[in-house]
Image (tube, rainbow, N blue to C red):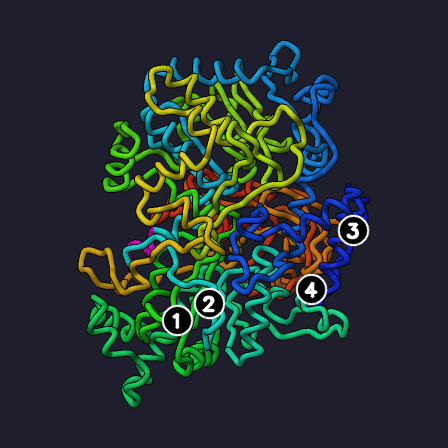
Amino acid sequence: MADQSWSQKDYHHPAAGWGAAISVNKVLAKEHAFGRGSAAMFRMNHENDGFDCPGCAWPDDLKGLKLDICENGIKHVVWEMTSKRVDREFFAAHTVTELEGWSEFELEDQGRLTEPMVYDAASDKYVPISWSDAFALVGAELRALDDPDQASFYTSGRLGNEATFLYQLMAREYGTNNLPDCSNMCHEASGRALQASLGTGKGTADLKDWETADALFIMGVNAASNAPRMLTALTEAFDRGAQIVHVNPLIEAASRKAIIPHEMVDMALMKATRTGTLNLQVRPGGDMALMRGMAKALLEEFRSDPRALDVEFIERYTHGFEDYRDLVEATPWSTLVEQSGLKEKEIRKAARIYSEADRTLISWCLGVTQHEHGPDAIREIVNVLLLRGNLGREGAGPSPVRGHSNVQGNRTCGIDHRPSADFLDRLDAACGIEAPREHGRDTVSTIAGMHDGTIKVFVGMGGNFVLAAPDTPYTAEGLRNCELTVQVSTKLNRSHLVHGRKALILPCLGRTEKDEQKHGLMETSVEDSMSMVHLSRGKRRPASPHLLSEPAIIAGMARATLPDSATPWDWYVDDYDRIRDTMAKALIGFEDFNRRVRLPLGFRLKQPARELVFGTPSGRAEFSSAPLPDVIPADADVLVLQTMRSHDQWNTTIYSDDDRYRGVKNLRTLVFLHKDDMRARGIEQGGQVDIVATCKDGTTRELRGYTALRYDLPRGSAAGYMPEMNVLIGAADYSEQSDQPLMKNVKVRITPAR
């Protein structure tokens, strides 16, 4: 993919702009896709007339923008539209053992899967299998289990709402709530925290709130790479005079300035707009201390200025304020400074920005959630919002940034290993089943179950489970211990090579492709990160005539697994409107689904907390009085490492070894370090280092021969790329609060390579 030379230089250019345009053109040229790629740009994110971007979950432009796209979205679409094919001839030429030695880039670069394949142990190759035989194999293995809870049904965020609903229906009719998903690794903390604070698992803000807020706090988000269309909201916020505070250990390109490519005049004049007014480099895990420090400053200000707090809002809509106030006032500034990694004057400056803004929105992503105390940190964010009544009005509220296209829709439509009794009652009534009530397994416990033999069948709807999950070797061992693994995918990836005793690869349609069923061309719906539900319609000819849609694959597995089922699986697949009619009965907020989803821009799911209706035990918004955690390792030689994506990467898909916004070229096996931490350890710029992580259970994991690079990040911290660094995160390294793997809080020692 790349030669052996690498380079690093400071990146001072605007985010997006000509850098993004040049990158897109390189991708289009490499794939010989100028025609189809350019056409796709004008169809992406055009509800009811185009397809939803298969990348991030940022909402679509409210003004009907014709080029509501970004660099990474185009890369993802072109990646899907490649002319390369992985067919039976490819599999006949390569054993699985050989393919295991290929890089992640090389595997996915082979192109689109074309027909169902089954693993043949005698030849160590995948061989063709008919769809009917593939479904029969799945059904036979699932029916042979002693207990439905011996199967686990995983999904990534790419699944549409209709397929999601059928998938969870199949699992629950089969008899299990083992429905792990990528949220278990990303935003589980957000859902649990918001549910406890506000009685809803989602943010309350929408895109209009982003467009009208006086102050935006962006926490733990690398927007330029992970949600690039956010840059439009940030530049517009700056132009109208809003304050934009970025909170992140690393100062990312998105926090400085940007040129929005669809702003043609700005592109022509190379006119950049600022995207931030203040950068706060907290130590990893220091976000909660920052928020509590802001609350302390507000309470101090309130003594002389009653406008600092919204007393009427607090008295009318909240519970627990007195206990929280006492806790904050008892927390010394020295503790807040130490734990946040910031100076007191920096915390007070952030608090002043907050108190002077009439309407404030706080947004966060994985930099906040993937810590031991992630839910407590998010509840602290809500505490700060409640102090000034920044809830239930325009331009204000909590706004988590979801990183994958329909991951929020997956949870809304039933992918939840801890479903509520109310949801299950409605599902039973709408679908005529008796769903199990016991909680199921999430991602972490599914991997544990593979190891102890209590999970024997694993079905993955999209994604690359073995690379996305923590402790890669441990996860791989678990998958190999299964009787059957089933991977529903568009491209070849590592999870096809790390398989059970029996294994299937089932290729599905991509988001850009026509989904033709008995009653014509079908549309699927998705939900963005701000609760808007809209349609997506692919228009390209499928990569192979043998591909099936995800609803059709799920229905095929369900028929074979549940031969006596009264659920009309084939009838549902003939016309997705029928699935939506059933969803309208089973899901709160989806009433009159088929009509409303066809409205311009679709419809927004109602958020009771936005209307100041709280589904909490007290019926009010709950202040949290959680203790402030100690996020500083006791041993000064230990660094806190966070894993992250490079810019030329989407989740586990790696497009190249470059990271433009961090100035890195031709290198992924790296670790970013503060210059003083390097000096203290005798590490030279570009020097080879060994990284040893000590896990919660006392075991160690290591990476050897990584390249150390200087970077502007807090002392005592380090950073590097996932999925390569996932090997450092042990099976026991997950939050006791959220069960999320601690991917932003890995305790490591880094030394010159032996």
Q: Are marks 4 and 2 in contact (CB under 8 Å)?
A: no
Residue drawn at the location 54% of the way across and 33% of the way down:
520
Residue 176 visible in the snapshot: yes
Q: CA distance from mark 2 to mark 3?
A: 34 Å
Q: Which residue is mark 4?
A: 261
Label placed on residue 394: 1
Upstream in sequence: badge 1 or badge 2: 2
Q: Position of residue 107 (x, y in %)?
A: 69, 33
The extreme top residue here reads: 122
Q: For the residue marked with disc 1, what is the amino acid? A: Glu
Lower position in the chain sequence, tag 4 or tag 1? 4
Q: Secondary structure at mark 3?
A: helix
> In this picture, which residue range is highlighted in magenta?
192-197
Residue 501, how many percent across, how many down? Answer: 52, 16
User: Is there CB contact under 8 Å for labels 1 and 2?
Assistant: yes
| Helix, strand or loop status at disc 4 | loop
Instruction: Give me the residue at 50% from left, 64% from top.
Output: 283
Along the horizontal axis of the image, is 58 left or right of 425? right
Q: Circle 3 is placed at which residue position?
A: 26
Residue 669 image label: none
